[in-house]
Image (cartoon, rainbow, N blue to C red):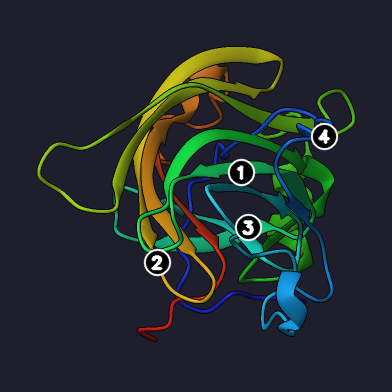
Amino acid sequence: MKRFPGLSLVLPPLVGVLLLAGCEDKPKFSAGVAPGGDSAELAGVAMVGSGAEIVLNSENTHITFVGSKPAGDKHNGGFKKVDGILKLDGQREKPQISDVSVNIDADSIFTDVGDRLTTHLKSKDFFSVKDNPRITFQSTTTATVPGQRGKVNVTGDLTLLGVTKPVSFVLTVESGKFPYISGEFEISRKEFGMNFKPGDINDKVSVKVEVGKSEKK
């Protein structure tokens, strides 16, 4: 089972819309070698000129979550299959997020306790993956957070269990050879119709998203 240490992403997922065809006037990056001949330490992440598109994939993008109970018990999980596009504007030293589109394969969910919990989360009690195979997010607006360098407020439409709701969260962009983008936020599972055992399982789910690898780690 693949795990991503240090990630505690949101459960009723995160982000995206079906992988879209990118603009032709900005470079796109997929797994392999970054422009200029640099061997990308992390597939798909690079910056060039005044803007770029990062092709999100399961190697460079980690979406994880923490679900909890009133008694204090917690379980970690995430999704193994993710794709999408994240657009950046600005110079390499000061990249800014301009658009985020994410598509998550709900059936690729994993947990920290193995098959029993994972299978239950795939059922109609939670993600109902047979009827709702995709979780998507598409940003509608992005704006820098005043006075906080590298922080961008992202608002968009999250679709989970066939229900679309607006959500807002802050992503932090760390500049470097390859940008590192991260954010943590909470969502309400009941807003999307996930109502299994409301008194035994907390409504709020913590989600974390990471794109790239921090040079500070």
**Dots 2, 4 in contact, CB < 8 A:** no
Label 2: element kind: loop
Marks 3 and 2 sit apart, C-alpha to C-alpha, by: 26 Å
Residue annotated with mark 1: 86
Residue annotated with mark 4: 129
Q: Nearer the viewer, residue 152 or 134?
A: 152
Measuring 59% from the left and 74% from the top, which residue is drawn there?
A: 4
Report if residue 203 is visible in the image. Answer: no
Q: Position of residue 61 (x, y in %)?
A: 64, 60
Disc 3 or 2, which lies upstream in sequence? 3
Q: Position of residue 104 (x, y in %)?
A: 74, 42
Comparing marks 3 and 4, which lies closer to the viewer? 3
User: Alpha-carbon neighbours of circle 1 within 10 Å: few (<14), some, or many (≥20)?
Assistant: many
Disc 3 or 4, which lies upstream in sequence? 3
Q: Position of residue 193 (x, y in %)?
A: 57, 17
Horizontally, is 145 left or right of 87 in the view?
Answer: left
Horizontally, is 174 left or right of 150 in the view?
Answer: right
Marks 3 and 1 sit apart, C-alpha to C-alpha, by: 19 Å
Measuring 81% from the left and 76% from the top, which residue is drawn there?
A: 33
Disc 2 or 4, which lies upstream in sequence? 4
Q: Which mark is residue 175?
A: 2
Comparing marks 3 and 2, which lies closer to the viewer? 2
Where does the C terminus fall, quadrant-wise? bottom left
Disc 3 or 1, which lies upstream in sequence? 3
Considering only vertical position in the picture, is 139 above or below 77?
A: above
User: Alpha-carbon neighbours of circle 3 within 10 Å: few (<14), some, or many (≥20)?
Assistant: many
Residue annotated with mark 3: 78
Q: Nearer the viewer, residue 14 or 44?
A: 44
Q: Nearer the viewer, residue 18 or 88?
A: 88
Q: Position of residue 40 (x, y in %)?
A: 70, 79
